[in-house]
Image (cartoon, rainbow, N blue to C red):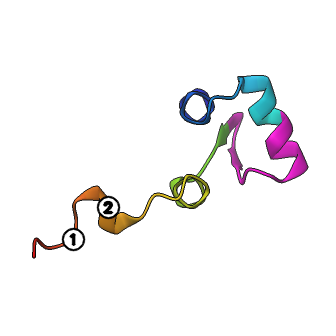
Amino acid sequence: MAQFAEMVGMSRNAVYVAIERGDVQAVRIGKRIVIPTAPVRKLLRIDEASTGSAEAA
């Protein structure tokens, strides 16, 4: 949660609000709130090809 807040430039409180509104997908595991990486990558427009996994031309 804190890592996500830092990545997107939001406070932790703002992240909680965004989760409550449904703007950010999250999963509760016990007492922890976990934000899956796939929705984060989509939100930040991070393409797997741009992470270096693509073959060199």
Q: Is residue 6 above or below residue 19?
A: above
User: Magenta includes 52?
Assistant: no
Name the residue tied to disc 2.
50
User: Magenta includes 30?
Assistant: yes
Would residue 23 appear left or right of 41 to someone viewing this image?
right
Residue 15 picture location, percent across and down: 75, 34
Front in this rendered view, residue 21 or 9 = 9
Front in this rendered view, residue 8 or 2 = 8
Badge 2 vs badge 1, beta-carbon distance below 8 Å: yes
Mark 1 secondary-structure assignment: loop
Quadrant for residue 43, please give it.
Answer: bottom right
Q: Which amino acid does label 2 sit on?
A: Ser
In this view, which residue lies farthest toward the left?
Answer: 57
In this view, which residue lies farthest toward the right?
Answer: 21
Residue 24 picture location, percent across and down: 74, 50
Name the residue tied to disc 1.
54
Mark 2 secondary-structure assignment: helix
What range is drawn magenta here? 17-32
Residue 54 picture location, percent across and down: 21, 71
Residue positioned 42% across, 64% down in the render: 47
